[in-house]
Image: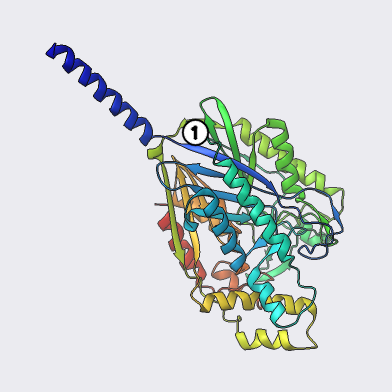
Amino acid sequence: MNNLLCKAIAALLSCFTLLSFNYAQTVNVAVFNANVTPPVGSPVAYATARSIMDSLSARGIVLLTDEKPVVLCAVDWIGIANEGLEIWQKKLAEAANTTTDRVSIHSLHQHDGVHCDFTMARIMNAYGIKNAPFDTAFLLSAIQHVADAVRDAVKHPQPVTHIGFGEAKVEKVASNRRILGPDGKVAIIRWSSMKDSAARAAPEGVIDPWLKCVSLWDRDKPVAIMTYYATHPQSYYGQGDVTCEFIGIARNASEKQTGIPHIHFNGAGGNIAAGKYNDGSAAMRPVLAKRVETAMNLAWKRTKKTALAGKDIAWKSLPVTLPLGKNIVKDSLTATLDSPQASFSDKLAAAEKLAWYQRSVAGQQVNVSSLRLGKTWLLNLPGELFVEYQLAAQKMRPGEHVCTAAYEEYGPGYIGTRIAYSQGGYETSDIVSGVAPEVEDVLMNAMRAVLQ
């Protein structure tokens, strides 16, 4: 009888050990997708919405492990900044039952998308500037709609047992916007679309041509796909025809083909655009979309799976202070906002940077974060970041996969490398960039810290 009792106790202990082990290794994911399309008549980045060519979406995942949930979200808007980002993070954190430092929200930067910055809106209202490009009621409604989608998604999680990774080159889309002359200064600015023959003939310059595809699997069943590629995503824009642009069109087409939820993140594409290959005609949008879609599908076909357990997952978030640019001077910005002679576009630019100034002097920090999934790292960075940061991040984890999503905190605008601020060009001129050259040291150090 004692022998039987001992065996029973041993069996029971074995069960407890097994249950404890399985619990410790549990990984689940909730996938969400919410419509965030503005109504006709609502302001978008450079005009009033006059038509809806494509729906805009906010897509993402909530990763559920033994730790607090992690939320990754990509939004078909031009930018989410300052108090706008704060409210997004707060609402999504509440919906996922996590903390705001574990919520990473990125815009894809479509130029016929929505701008969300409640700090900037408040400043424009205080200075009596009419026709501010913000529909506050819509913005708050859209954020709540996404939060509701997150809350509903976490009620229906799916197991994750494997992670997949694949990559493919995107042909004839990305090119560097800053073409340097023999003196090392910017000689030609290459915009998102160009008809100038010299700009079209110039080399691609420094880019990252690789589109990276990360997938989450429940054994042999794919649950979600996340892709990463660095470029300004617009082909033509500015008339108020709302679109998710060629990058969103490619994502939607790939998702339809695979039948798997597809989330796309824009990489460090601040100094990257399609100008070498895009003449700005309507006919080029589907061409560019097809080129990106082809790479998405090829990266998916090249996917290789590896097992993923709780011990293989880690989240790191580091708040950093970005050095304020020397041109971001309060008196100068307020003078522009007060001036009857200043143009509306000048007032917009001044309000945008005054919002960043106010946040900076108040001590507001921005997050640099990473999610490690085995040997794949998902790196989250602020602003319209130059591609050199993305390329540097990849070198920090040799032999592994680093996928960079930029455009998280849109407040600082362009973030160049140290040398870029001495080279001229649009992105680092006047008040276009809200940060100083020393930003390179701050971000490189933060990237190293979260990629350890």
Position of residue 221 relative to residue 377, above or below, is above
Instruction: Indicate the quadrant containing the N terminus: top left, top right, bottom left or bottom right.
Output: top left
Left or right, residue 48 beside residue 328: right
| Residue 382 % position (x, y) | 56, 61
Residue that lies at the very extreme toward the front in this rendered image: 1
| Coloration of the structure image | rainbow
Q: Residue at x 53, y 44 (%)?
A: 62
Instruction: Please give the residue where the numbered disc 1 appears in the rendered image.
Output: 160
Q: Nearer the viewer, residue 104 or 209?
A: 104
Q: Is residue 230 left or right of residue 245?
A: left
**Left or right: where does residue 202 sit relative to residue 315?**
right
Numbered-mark total: 1
Secondary element at tag 1: loop
Q: Nearer the viewer, residue 369 or 299?
A: 369
Q: Residues within 10 Å of mark 1 (few under 14, many from 20)?
A: many
Taking the spot 69% from the left edge, 57% from the top edge, the residue there is 141
- Tell me where residue 215 appears, x and y as whole percent: 56, 36
Residue 296 location, quadrant: top right
Residue 320 versus residue 67: which sits nearer the camera? 67
The residue at the point 76 percent across, 55 percent down is 234
Residue 415 appears in view: no
Left or right of 158 on screen, residue 347? right
Q: Is residue 322 visible?
A: yes
Q: Amino acid at mark 1?
A: Val
In this view, 428 is above or below 65: below
**Image location of residue 177, percent across then percent down:** 70, 62
Question: Which of these two is toward me, 188 or 329?
Answer: 329
Q: How far across and how far down the image is residue 394, in percent?
A: 50, 50
